[in-house]
Image (spheres, rainbow, N blue to C red):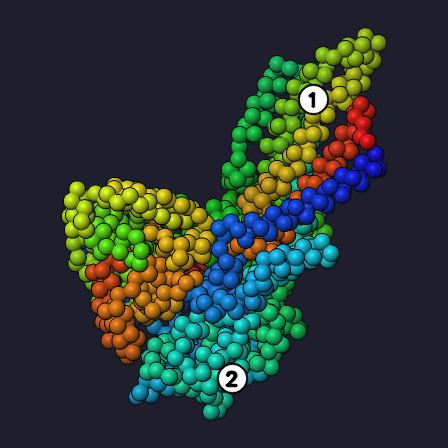
Amino acid sequence: MRSTQAIAKALLAASLAAVALAACGSGESSSSSVGSGNASVLVSPGYQSSANESLAGKRGGTLTVLQEADFEHLDPGISYFALDYTVVFATQRPLYSNEPNSNQTVPDMASAPPEISADDKTITVHLREGVHFSPPVNREVTSEDVAYAIERGANPNVANPYLTTYFNSLEGIKQADGGPIKGIETPNKHEIVFHLTEPKGFYVAEALCLPLTAPVPREYAEKFDKNKPTNYADYEVATGPYMLKNDAQGKVLGIGYVPGKSATLVRNPNWNPKTDFRPAYLNEIDIKIGGAQAVIDRQVLEGTDVVQNEPVVQSAVKLAAEHYRSQLEISPGAGNRYVSLNNKVGPFTNINLRKAVFAALDRAALDRERGGDLVSNVATHFIYPTIPGFEQAGGLKGPKLDYDEHPDGDVALAEKYMKLAGYPSGKYTGTETLQVVGASSPPEKEDAEVVNQALKNLGFKTKLTLVEISTMYAKYCDVPKEEIDVCPTVGWIADFADPETVLNDTFNGKSIVSTGNVNYGQFDDPKINEAMAAGELVQGKEARAKAWGKIDDEIIEQAAAIPYDWEKSPRLEGKGVHGVGMLWNEGAWDYSFTSLK
Amino acid sequence: MIRYIIRRLLWGVLLLIVVAALMFLFFRILPTGNPALLRAGRDPQPKLVKEIEVVLGLNKSLPVQFWDYMKEVFLHFKFGYSYYSQEEVRSLIAERLPATLSLTLGAAVLWIVGGLGVGVISALRRHTLADRFAMGGALLAISAPEFWLGLVLLFLFASDIGKLKILPGAGSYVGLTSDPWKWFTSLIMPWIVLASGAAAVFARLMRSSLSEAMKEDHIRTARAKGLPERSVVRQGVRSAINPIVTLFGLEAGALLGGAILVEYVFDIPGIGELNYKAIQQSDFPVTQGTVLLASMFIILANILVDVAYAYLDPRVRYS
């Protein structure tokens, strides 16, 4: 870890002339801030980054992709994870999409930016003409197909995971069960209109970049959507430059996708490059699923036309940084990581105790556990780089609060807050044992241990439980009735580049639910809830960045949780690959822009 | 003997029912999380979770779920559908079974031939250089974790990432019918890794067991009668083999356990890898199916061992 920092610092000195240096926490940083749209991006100087990768490439060839994990869902109506998106965004065309090196959306299935009415309650989208579904459907895409794609999201057999989160203000959405939705109108073949019950047009329009809006042909998919659960993914058709290999009947399962084994993307014969901003250089993408990451890392570093499409383990990052630097790309903006403290029950209902832990925690140590400056930055607030509102919330330095200004931890300051909390000795003297639940895999395990030790140093008695990460969320940190005091390794990543998607679910008191609760600390501050309600209605990127940046600072002022890491995502490519990572999707390789040298 | 075999088989079925029941309960009681929550994404809304529970059948009472599950497993040999890929677990298993059988049977042959061979040589040449070398190697093989040994072999010999590029590396497995030579070469390293630990145990046990057997009176008598040394050794091996056969039954479980890691390291699409991923994803139907299948193999292996034991040692009688 230290050596990685040293490399990064040496590189920093060499690249000072090219980029503006941003201060970071306790001292110098190996991250530099460059603009991307209206949000800052922290790149690691001297390394390739998805933020500044050239999009030019050479046409042809087959790319081999090695990935340890399997896809979860390739159905555009269900898909919700970075790895799934690599295939979904190469095969499907939502109304809007991101260019790989930007967090700004561009029209994709749409022909122009959305038209939002003056009252912010109606969104009109015009569709491109001449976009066709892949075989066996073949016909031209119409607005009806986009309407059906969204409607099926409400079908319990499809059960889209974010429909009610982002499209809740769509008229008729509460009654929707897979049939027509009152608030979706298709006046003609190439126009779709969304009617909202609240003035949230700007925000809903931003969510139109999610894969749920990728067209699905009703007459073809309906029979699959009747199955419990839907098996449309086994037969899905494409609108993008690539399609999952299929047979004449459209069957993908066992041909273009073999669960746990492979996926094969081939060119969509009905794709018309004139209708798309994607260059689609590659002829074919062969994805091999399975194997050990330690082996995959080496296979990619030693290989030619091959990439690894998962975040790389620390040892491989170090190896690549030292010996294969041209094959390492580091993407900023891969989410935040923070310590969740229970604001509802237990000792951390006392704000000064929260501030004491905030002050005491060695966040720089946590950052080092994750690989140091090269692959992360010490966080000082929640809106992370690449998301609008980051600079407005204080940028790298954060909102300038004493307990937030010492990434290495400040014991004296912590004692001051302990005394303010009513513990004159500067140590906690309560008798209860704090329940601390973390993940058992590295680096989360080490993070949890650092946090646990910091709590002990302040006099807390703790019981540290380490479990598999999905269990940590589903059984403990997501379940308020478990009354977990501290979840040391929770994190969040935005669904699209809007600060509301970072803060609203995770810190709005109204979002607290009995299961699947992502407001982990059950933070419920009426003043901040009100500010968020107002923020939901703000229009315009700049205005939203300002409003939500302020909310971010207010959450830090309440020490609702302790942010410690803004993550970056390292990826590896073979010697013969010009990989282009998706800045907006944790740096995952974009198959529509990646090419062979 | 036939009555004994039938009785053991019936006990085996009963044991499978108990294993199935325990697995069902463990996966629902132990802290793994609600699969509907896992399926519902990062911000799971309660309504959505309930809908998914209905689709996955998780809204039914536990006894109803249990009865449905047992009925399907034991009457129709069906293990349900994967929560993630929605594929039938039976077909997922059937698709991967050949790879696991290729790996485990090949490794079993290697471990029996290698382990017993080395053990016999060591026993007959005690305290020689060959014996010390063999036992030192065995100690190393017992101590080396399969995951580590697999990586070392790959980094040394794999054609893509090895220093000496002489054998196909991870992800090179193909089915026996599609390319027999490639199938064979792709499994050489996995066989060695999977067999090494058990072969080493067998070698050490065979050495000590045979050394003792060769000191027995009937061996001395055989030699005194002028029997050729080969026949004498054969007699010795036969009387030394019983503890080895017993150990084989125990090692069958370890073999399947080891296959999970070896399949993972060498990217062999078998049952072990399927199980590993299913555990990571809390994909209960797949986990239950693979564990039940493994239990069935272990029970069968132990029945075979007991039958072999009776065959090899006439003193053993079963009523």
Q: Residues within 10 Å of mark 2 (few under 14, many from 20)?
A: some
Which residue is identified by label 2? A180
Residue drawn 23% across and 44% down? A428
Residue at the farthest top position: B224
Q: Chain of mark 1?
A: B
**B295 vs A269: above or below:** above
Choose between B8 and B230: the one closer to the eye.
B8
Where is residue A499 drawn, in percent x and y? 30, 69
Residue drawn 56% across and 80% down? A217
Choose between A76 and A355: the one closer to the eye.
A355
Choose between B232 and B41: the one closer to the eye.
B41
Where is residue B145 drawn, in percent x and y? 53, 35
B71 vs A282, left or right, is right
Where is residue A435 drawn, in percent x and y? 36, 48
Report the quarter where the N terminus of chain A lies. Answer: top left
Which residue is identified by label 1? B120
Disc 2 secondary structure class: loop
A224 vs A165, left or right, is right
Amino acid type of the residue that numbered disc 2 sits on in the rendered structure = Pro
Disc 2 with disc 1 on a shared chain: no
